Amino acid sequence: MILVTGATGKVGRQVVAQLRDAGVGVRALVRDPQSAALPAGVELARGDLTDAQSVQRAAEGVDAVFLVWPLPAVEGAYDVLAAVEKHAGRVVHLSAHGVPDDDSGEPEPGILGTHTAIERAIRGSGLEWTLLRAGGFAANTLGWAEQIRGGDVVRGAHARATRSLIHEADIAAVAVRALTTDELVGAAPHLTGPQALTQAEQVRTIGEVLARGLEFEEIGEAEAAAAYEAQGLPPEYAQGIVAAHRHMVAEPETVSPAVERITGRPGRTYREWVADHVADFS
């Protein structure tokens, strides 16, 4: 039995579906079982990552846990890990590329700092672990969906920022391998898509799939950060994203072979991801 947190999110939903397809027992931690809309046969456990006791109840009798930590504050993660460790033997954490292997020094503020602190806690636990250090999620470009539904121009900072975006189904495929075999115990694979595209090329790809002429229009960093904050991101996260895009102009993200090496199949392209999400942009 595998406990999946973040089970109704983009990656978690894929993990649940792929585990079920593999015939593995799945328990999903969900806030509202009635609206979860997960596959038949999935056991639903009402709970929330902000409530470590609910996680502990959900972890009873499971062998492994897929851990997503979408919250900006890291403190609650320690209680959740302690709850998991009371029952499960393994945790697979959806982390982020750029987390240092070196445990010295204080974690930096923002997303990477949060994942750094959680990784250190996991490595210091008694659990078997795998750390999925994913690069940019293709699903993050759904942040452009409202603009695309309203016109043919996507506005953002740094059109030439280059990312090797990964399909959530590929992250899930690696997670399933880590949860159900011993092949990735103690590993921290860098997961990316199979190609690197600028933000302008990403927008153009969406337009080609939708049969529309979409364009990327550059705006300043302050305006771009404000737009991320309007979507609900904390200011330090919004500013961190814009700064990362600035960095990716000079130093484009690299492409990692890990998805194909681990799963035995090439990673899905960004165009394939867009085709899978046409309804989200329409």
Image (spheres, helix red, strand yellow):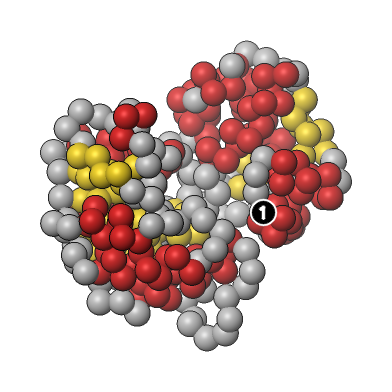
Count of numbered circles on the image = 1
Which residue is the site of mark 1?
Answer: 234
In-front residue for pair 44/160 = 44
In-front residue for pair 11/193 = 11
Q: Residue at x 50, y 59 (%)?
A: 96
Q: Looking at the picture, how far across and down is residue 275, in whole percent?
A: 49, 23
Q: Residue at x 82, y 50 (%)?
A: 221
Place residue 181 in its image quadrant. Answer: bottom left
Can residue 172 be seen?
no
Would residue 159 be found to the left or right of residue 189 on screen? right
Place residue 208 in its image quadrant. Answer: top right
Q: Residue at x 30, y 55 (%)?
A: 54
- Vertical position of residue 24 compared to residue 121: above or below: above
Q: Residue furthest top?
A: 211
Can residue 151 be seen?
yes
| The C terminus - image quarter | top right
Residue type, numbered disc 1? Pro
Q: Residue at x 53, y 39 (%)?
A: 138
| Neighbours of disc 1 within 10 Å: few (<14), some (14-19), many (20+) | some
- Vertical position of residue 234 compared to residue 153: above or below: below
Q: Looking at the picture, how far across and down is residue 90, in whole percent?
A: 23, 64
Place residue 133 in its image quadrant. Answer: bottom left
Secondary structure beneath label 1: loop
Q: Looking at the picture, how far across and down is residue 240, in whole percent?
A: 69, 58
In-front residue for pair 37/10 = 37
Q: Looking at the picture, how far across and down is residue 119, in whole percent?
A: 42, 70
In-front residue for pair 54/259 = 54
